[in-house]
Image (cartoon, rainbow, N blue to C red):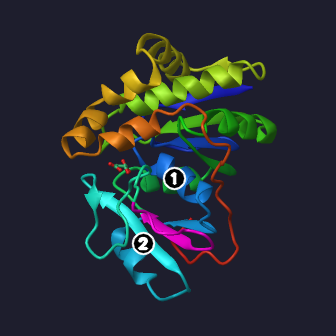
Amino acid sequence: MKLRVDLLPHGSYPDVVLVIDALRATTTAVTYLERGAQALLLTSTPEAALALRGTRDHLLLAGERGGLPIPGFDLGNSPAGANTPVLGGRTVVMNTTNGTGAAHIAAQSGKHVLLAALTNAHAAARRARALVTEGIAIVCAGTEGRVGLEDVYTAGVLAEYLLAMGEFTLDDGARIALTVRRGAGDPGEALAGSDHGLYLTTLGLGEDVRFASGLSTSTVVPTLVRGGDAPEGTL
Ligand code: MLT
């Protein structure tokens, strides 16, 4: 089977897609579900998220632009956020600069769309391996159209786990991701030294970077559910 890594989102996808935005959207998505959120709705715009306000009980709006909370939202996008309210049983509507958009691109053609980060890397690789029949694409969200070291490094971690689980033929993107994983130090160094990690640290969000560096600390794998009661335009 084929294993492909897209250094930025594009095009059409095989049956299993792993979407990565390690700093911070997919790390945050894993954390919200880990902390008891009942469901996540990923919108393509902040306006779509705001329009959902009041459409169902116990909604929370979470997201960021430029790393900072979106006005009118309840939460920013901090996976380490100590002040995150009780999430049990609540639905969180998420919209972020890059990560939720990457998930929407993947959902246009991917049959199984999973959200992956360092924090759920092994569980995400196991789930992808269990689901795949044609091939796996690992999609790096990047930051505003630029490749992100943190996402490519995470893709390399996922690729390593998958290679230990079965036979895959790699594309150049996968080989690049594995090289980055093997050359960029430990997860903490790679994420802290990335452009977006450095930027978040200047915003005082270094704790999020450290949190997002935790390797396989969660077994939660956010998975896109099609149909159901998800409103139009959300995932
Ligand atoms: C993203 O979507 O790229 C991230 O959410 C950005 C961030 O949280 O800083």
**Residue 61 has which mark?**
2
Q: Nearer the viewer, mark 2 or mark 1?
A: 2
User: Residue 41: x, y in percent?
Assistant: 54, 68
Residue at position x 64%, y 58% from top?
224
Residue at position x 55%, y 76% from top?
232
Circle 2 residues within 10 Å: few <14, some 14–19, many ≥20: many
Circle 1 residues within 10 Å: few <14, some 14–19, many ≥20: many
Which residue lies under the disc numbered 1?
A: 103
Horizontal side of 42 relative to 135 (left or right) equals left
**Residue range (magenta):** 83-94
Decide if ligand 1 comes within 8 Å of the CB at mark 1.
Answer: no
Q: Amino acid at mark 2?
A: Leu
Residue 190 visible, this orientation: yes
Viewport quadrant of the C terminus: bottom right
Viewport quadrant of the N terminus: top right
* Front position in the image: 186 or 12: 186
Residue furthest bottom as drawn: 54
Residue at position x 37%, y 38% from top?
209
Q: Secondary structure at mark 2?
A: strand
Q: Amino acid at mark 1?
A: Ala
User: Residue 116: x, y in percent?
Assistant: 57, 42
Q: Main secondary structure of the magenta part?
A: loop
**N-terminal-most mark, 2 or 1:** 2
User: Residue 96: x, y in percent?
Assistant: 37, 57
